[in-house]
Every structure is written in structure tokens, then in C-alpha cells.
């Protein structure tokens, strides 16, 4: 699933979404005013998040204007919905996700070229979730050799309200690929997947996912530990911690 932050003229946004849905399954996250069919709680007028997909239509309250809710809704979509694109529409909602490098920004004016954006989206990184990586590992042709699938999720701890990761993308991907290759060469390891986020990651959000399919749990646990330590030592990334006391770079 690829994520689009969509802003601009309302009519042009609808035309862009229509063009996208001609060939793809699309979920749309946008504000929607209360009406008789929303079943909103009293007092929730104009505070609804609309999730629309080809197969279902859901309305959920936007609780406390929580900035983490949009990323969490996107994670939920990536885990459970069979969609190609998730479109987050409107400046109020898109402002909560545009700091992520996994989000493609589209700002539409009257002369906007849809084809340019649609072509660029084909090469844009996907919004990765742990569940998506696990499904990918389960589809490996040799998965019948595995007796366990083990996962590791790194998160932003409570003392920081966000972390910002500055990553040399090309070199980082090369190093991650090397780590994966070495781990898969070990005895009993069937498959390994690693994904590290970049940009700003807020408190409580996930930073890194590691999934290992192994013949036995002992081999899987070792592969997880080795992967974590090698990522810290070998992958070129810089981390800025944002707290109430200010900002500081860690490990620089």
C-alpha cells in the first residue's frame, strides 16, 4: 500500500481520486460532516474520519485530535485492507503524516498534471507494516521448512515526543540488504525481512521491524539479536531526539 497526502482544490482532488480508482483499489481518509447516516455520538459534528474503500465504508471518531491517529489508521489499513493506495485528504489531516518519507505529497492546482503524479507513484516506497512483512515471509516458497516466525519491533519511548531519522537511503538499503543476506546464510534461517523508517517518528510509533522465519526458535532468536546489533553499528543513520527540554542528536 502506498500513501498519498492530497491537498488543493476540492474539485481537482476529486478528479485525481477518480483517475486513481479507475485501475486501483483506493482507501480515502478525509473529514466528513455529521449527518443522519454517520451514527456519530452527540457533539461529534465535523470530527469524523471517513475511511472509504471499494469494499466497505467506515466512520470513526477522531479522538482528542491525536496526531498519532492517522498513522495508526494507515497501519490498520495496511494490515487488514486489500488496497493499493491510501489517500489522506485535506491539510488538517495530511499535516500529521507529511514528515514521513513513506508519504507522497500531491498538491493540486487548476493546471496539475495527474499523469506525472500517477507515474511517480509507481516507484514510490510503500507504507510498510509488521503484518505486511509477516505475510511476505509466509509466502516464501520454503516456508514449510520453518518451525517459527519471530519478530522484533523498535518503538519511540515515552521520554521523547518524537525522533527524527536522517538516513543515506542508497547506502542504508545496501547495508540492510547485506545484513539480510548474511543472516539468511546461517544454518536454519529460511527468510529475513527488515524495514527501518526514516523522517519523523512520533512517540509510541514504530521505528524498525525485523521478521525472521527459522527452523527452530533458538536460531531465530539469534538472528534477531544479530540483526538489531548490526543495524545499530552498520547502517548509516542519524537520530535526533525531540523532548520537552529541546532537541539533540544522538550518536553523532
Image (spheres, grey):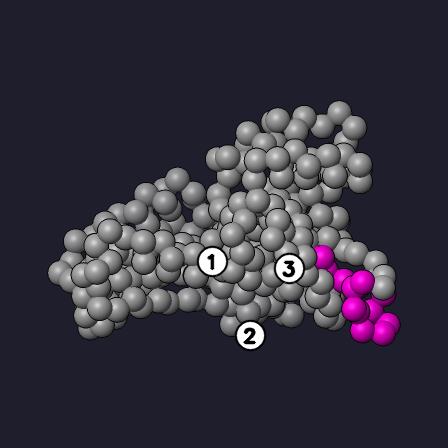
* Element class at badge 3: helix
Q: Quadrant of residue 137?
A: bottom left
Q: Residue 153: x and y, percent?
A: 42, 66
Question: Which one is in front, 182 or 55?
Answer: 55
**Residues under numbered marks 2 and 1 in contact, where contact means CB atoms less than 8 Å apart:** no
* Residue bearing mark 1: 129
Q: CA distance from mark 1 to mark 3?
A: 14 Å
Residue lying at 53% horizontally and 45% vertically, measured from the top left: 84
Q: Quadrant of residue 245?
A: bottom right
User: How dense is the environment of label 1, judged by Cα within 10 Å: few (below 14), some, or many (20 and up)?
Assistant: some
Q: Which residues are magenta?
A: 37-50
Q: Residue 108: x and y, percent?
A: 73, 34
Q: Nearer the viewer, mark 2 or mark 1?
A: 1
The answer to whether residue 208 is visible is no
Q: Does the magenta run of residues contain 160?
A: no
The answer to whether residue 216 is visible is yes
User: How dense is the environment of label 3, judged by Cα within 10 Å: few (below 14), some, or many (20 and up)?
Assistant: many
Residue lying at 66% horizontally and 50% vertically, measured from the top left: 28
* Residue bearing mark 2: 158
Residue lying at 37% horizontally and 46% vertically, measured from the top left: 172
Q: CA distance from mark 3 to mark 2?
A: 19 Å
Question: Which one is in front, 118 or 26?
Answer: 26
Residue 70 — which label?
A: 3
Which residue is farthest left?
Answer: 187
Q: Earlier in the sequence, mark 2 or mark 1?
A: 1
Amino acid at each position: 500500500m502506498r500513501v498519498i497526502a492530497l491537498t488543493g482544490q476540492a474539485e481537482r482532488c476529486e478528479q485525481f481520486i477518480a483517475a486513481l480508482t479507475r485501475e486501483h483499489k483506493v482507501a480515502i481518509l478525509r473529514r466528513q460532516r455529521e449527518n443522519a447516516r454517520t451514527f456519530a455520538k452527540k457533539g461529534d459534528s465535523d470530527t469524523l474520519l471517513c475511511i472509504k474503500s471499494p469494499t466497505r465504508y467506515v466512520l470513526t471518531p477522531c479522538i482528542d485530535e491525536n496526531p498519532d491517529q492517522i498513522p495508526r489508521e494507515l497501519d490498520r489499513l495496511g494490515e487488514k485492507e486489500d488496497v493499493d493506495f491510501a489517500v489522506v485528504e485535506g491539510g488538517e489531516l495530511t499535516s500529521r503524516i507529511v514528515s514521513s518519507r513513506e508519504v507522497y505529497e500531491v498538491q493540486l492546482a487548476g493546471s496539475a498534471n495527474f499523469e506525472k503524479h500517477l507515474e511517480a507513484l509507481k516507484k514510490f516506497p510503500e507504507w510498510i507494516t509488521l503484518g505486511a512483512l509477516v505475510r511476505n515471509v509466509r509466502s516464501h516458497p520454503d516456508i514449510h521448512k520453518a518451525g517459527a516466525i519471530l519478530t522484533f519491533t523498535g518503538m519511540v519511548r515515552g521520554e521523547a515526543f518524537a525522533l527524527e531519522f536522517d538516513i543515506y537511503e542508497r547506502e542504508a538499503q545496501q547495508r540492510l540488504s547485506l545484513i539480510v543476506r548474511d543472516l539468511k546464510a546461517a544454518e536454519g534461517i529460511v527468510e529475513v525481512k527488515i524495514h527501518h523508517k526514516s523522517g519523523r517518528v512520533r512517540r509510541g510509533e514504530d521505528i524498525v521491524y525485523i521478521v525472521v522465519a527459522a527452523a527452530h526458535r533458538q536460531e531465530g532468536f539469534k538472528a534477531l539479536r544479530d540483526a538489531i546489533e548490526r543495524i545499530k553499528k552498520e547502517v548509516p543513520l542519524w537520530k535526533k531526539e525531540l523532548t520537552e527540554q529541546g532537541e539533540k542528536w544522538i550518536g553523532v
